[in-house]
Image (cartoon, rainbow, N blue to C red):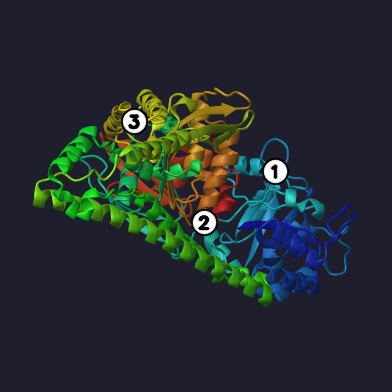
Amino acid sequence: MKIDLHCHTIKAKSGDGGRDIDPASLAEALAGNQVGIAAITNHNLFDLSIFKQCVAEASAKGIDLWPGIELDIRGKSRVVGHVIVIADPVHAKQFSDVCNGLVQCTHPDDFVLDWDKLAGAFVGQGFDFIVISHYRPFKGKSYKDKALPYADNQALKASFPVETPFFFEPSNLKRAGIMYADGVDCLIGSDVKDWSKYCECSLPEIKLEVKSFSQFLLLLRKTPEVLKSIMDKKTSEQVEITLFDDDAKLTFPVYNDVTIVFGAKGTGKTALLKKIENHFRAKGWTDVSSYYASENNDKYKQMVNVNPKEEDFVKLGVDDASDKFAGIRAWNEPAVTPFSNYISWEEYSVEKKDTARFGFALASAPVEPDLDAMRCLIDDYKTLISSANNILNNKIVEACLSSNEFSELRSAVLRVCMNAQSYVRSGFVDAYALHLECFTVKKMKSYITARTGSPTKPSGTGFSAFALSYKKARSILNSISDSFQNEPYEEKVVLGRLAEKGDVVQHRKYLINPSQGTKVSYLRDKVKAKNLKSLVAAIGNASDTAKTPCGALASKIAEVNKMTDEMGIASLKDCLGVTSYVSCGGDSSYEPSNGERAMIVLAHALFDDDASIYILDEPEASMGNEFINEVIVDRINQLAKANKIVIVSTHNANIAVRTLPWQSIYREYDGGCYRTYVGNPFCDELRDIAEVKPPKVWTQVSMDTLEGGEYAFTDREIVYGKLN
């Protein structure tokens, strides 16, 4: 939630052009910049009726408005500067009375109040208030226009009771950081001069939830009970780990927010993160996204090292031909009836003449029907019936047709089903009748031979079955061979984006034809490109051999079956492979630098939307300041707002402070042993988990330990909702 404690809504003084805004537009502007709390601080003027109108519009959008006024104050040195007073909105009427009593009927351009009268006007009036004076340092230029001299500001501050919240305002966040580093308490607002450009104002955020002006004051005063009650609203997971074998057990909470781990190099921060990750994984958390800077190269290689998965086969849009491979494996060359069988039968029949008594002895069996083809036809019929039911029971189809049209469709579909049933039944009856006839003739001939000891007339020459088996084998082999010629499936996966070069893209090609790519990774370990090429060639040779019936086909098919056995191939899915290359900015053989690899790997970890836990070890390593501030910090803040668990080990002050951590873990090597401190920026305290050492000041430890200088603490005071 953003906060703006310096808003002008009226052109009170000459030169205040662009500050006029009506209540409805004010609420829209504040909401558009995601402001949750704002103070109206017009120059030397507070209009209670207009304030109430603004409150009505703002509250409808969930925005709290606080009453305030920016006064011209004549300092001890007689120099005039601006001082803001903001009051509790619950007492807006009393605040209005005090302001009217001070200004009376004086025009805002002409009003000036002596410094020693300000405290007396507001203290003891029955309401809480905040004082914010434009700041000028002891030496150098003023940090904000219309600022009282340093000595005058100190005198003004001293005129108020010690418990009065008194702050100084710079002109921008950078100067606020310098003030904070110098130990100067500060608050900053937009001091908006043109509402049409308000969306461009860079405003601080309050991390902790603020529901009232009085709660805000308690946060500023660092009231422990208030801080604890707010922090306890976050969901937390209690973590118990032993970092090293000889260490004591560490127990601390991890919140659904940002936890920063920091400390000098070599204090075990990476080991701590890995232990935390193991803790979550051991408890069944599978949605953990982790990043370790030291593992960038290995992680990048894993990203680009693509291996096909079972489910990738459907991308090719081709049948897996498992039935075809099974058909080839089951194929046997049928025997042709030897001519000697006819000679034996003829000689025996001339000699004995007794087989004529058995009619079946002279019968010839018809050609055996293809029952496999019949079974396929039945399967097709079942599919047809299922599809017909789906069409007729589909609500969309019924809704898109008139009752007459749907009736015609229903009649047509049912007619097709009935005709198909007759067609399949007739074909099945004919085929099975032939099969039974063949079976009967062969059985009876076998029975006659067994009873009489005499040979019967051969059922047939076997030439027809022999030819048909070759035709079937060739059909199966051609089907498999044609499938191998299927076009590969190509897809692009964006690995990351490099600011000046564009997208880094991995091009993946899924294939079953080994001639369509190089450096292919296959689904099955036993399948290699060279052996697969040999199999494709062997299938083609067997198909060619099957064109003309001859004894060589059996050996060719045996060779194919031997190859598929050796490679474990039972379908085209087992031949699936993938090859890939990486491109960037038109370079089709791009190899990212170490820094670019780090960006790509980190982006994958940070932008894994399916994760609930993010563990990041030194994400700033090899990164530029722009990437750290605009990508890393921004993304971590987004994850925190989404109630994700984000644990970051860092040496970078921008990440450690501007990610608004809910908790900080500080690792220290002291006197030959490691110590772990846990705390947060809100209490400005780090507590020794072992309770051996006294607490440390979060601010001081952070400033001394983190890299990046004091600038990172620019907006820290507003961010955490309190000041030292």
Q: Tell me residue 192's x, y (percent).
A: 77, 53
Disc number for residue 527: 3
Q: Which one is nearer the viewer's eye here, 446 or 15?
A: 446
Counting other residues with Cα less than 10 Å from the Cα at mark 1, is it few (<14), some (14-19), or many (20 or more)?
many
**Is 434 drawn above or below residue 408 in the view shown?**
above
Q: Are marks 3 and 1 in contact (CB under 8 Å)?
A: no
Residue drawn 55% across and 51% down? 638
Quick one: label 3 or label 2, which is nearer the N terminus? 3
Q: Amino acid at mark 2?
A: Ala
Q: Amino acid at mark 1?
A: Arg
Residue under pointer 1? 136
Label 3: element kind: loop
Residue under pointer 2? 642
Q: Is residue 691 visible?
A: no
- Residue 308 shown left or right of residue 173 in the figure: left
Quadrant where the N terminus sits is: bottom right
